[in-house]
Amino acid sequence: MIRIISDTSTLYSVGEGKEKGIFVSPLAVTINDRTYEELEDISTEEFVDIINQGHIPLSSQPAIGKVVDLYNLFPEDEILNITMADGLSGTYNSAVLAKSLVDHPDSITVLNSKTLCGPHRALVDTANMMAQSGSSMADILERLNKMIASSRSFLIPKDYDYLERGGRLNHLTALLGKTIHLVPVLQLSEDGTHLTRFAIKRHYSKAIREIIDRLKKDNLGSGHQLYVSHSLEPQLAKEAYDLLKEAFPDTEIIIYKLSPAFTTQGGPGCIAIQSICME
């Protein structure tokens, strides 16, 4: 049997994953000198409340010991660990290191999803469905790698300070953006290792339309899924959803709430637009 392991980049909590037969390691966030396992010890709402008190958050990968414990649950089975994008987190490297610390490393495959959140969840769900239907590891990996190549991710932050601290924008650009209220759009690189500047617009709706234009160039269609993920900005998420639905009426669009770890990366109020081909 093939067991599917992942992390909370999927936006699955440990319990939600377990209900589907998926085994999830929580990412960690540190704020106000305390470390929490996201979606277990702290919700996004609680996390943002602490940020609003003036505290700066940090995020980190799952503890290696917990990944080792998951691997050791299934010494007789094949294991596929689908991690969030390497380069955005040390999760992939931790998963590989954990593999070297168990007695059955040859039965463990670690796959770098090169993505996160919505598309990451789609990859894990697909792998789990195929595993439960008896597909081989080779067939699962072939399907997932095709999906990974199709994935696109865009981020629209609300707080420039998070981008400046993370090196996504220099100080002068961040200051200019805050002064004249520009809307920056960042895109995840094709190798999934970093965010790059995609566009800067004067209005939120124009930023969404710029993303739509790029997705149309990528021939996004009914075989894809679209995701709008937000850090406690449901109205902005709904506005993005409506514009995307108008442009892609035959494409399924799912709205998710971002977890604390991704609120740390994009800042409170950020919006992520993502897509992946499911065929």
Image (cartoon, rainbow, N blue to C red):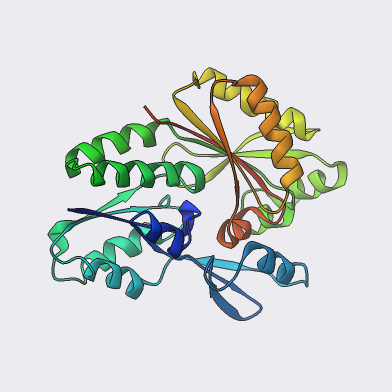
Residue 163 is at least partly visible in this image: yes
- Residue 232 lies, with reference to residue 223, above or below; the image says below
Q: Residue at x 44, y 64 (%)?
A: 15
Of the pair 162 and 223, the residue shown nearer to us: 223
Image quarter (top left, top right, bottom left or bottom right) of the C terminus: top left
Q: Residue at x 20, y 37 (%)?
A: 139
Q: Residue 135 location, x and y as percent?
A: 19, 40
Corner quadrant of residue 146 = top left
- Residue 219 lies, with reference to residue 120, above or below; the image says above
Q: Is residue 17 left or right of residue 142?
A: right
Q: Residue 104 location, x and y as percent?
A: 13, 65
Q: Is residue 130 left or right of residue 239?
A: left
Corner quadrant of residue 238 = top right
Q: Is residue 260 left or right of residue 1?
A: right
Q: Residue lying furthest front in this view?
A: 19
User: How many labels, in total?
Assistant: 0
Q: Residue 217 location, x and y as percent?
A: 54, 18
- Residue 135 lies, with reference to residue 78, above or below; the image says above
Q: Residue 143 location, x and y as percent?
A: 28, 34
Q: Residue at x 25, y 66 (%)?
A: 71
Q: Residue at x 66, y 78 (%)?
A: 32
Corner quadrant of residue 184 = top right
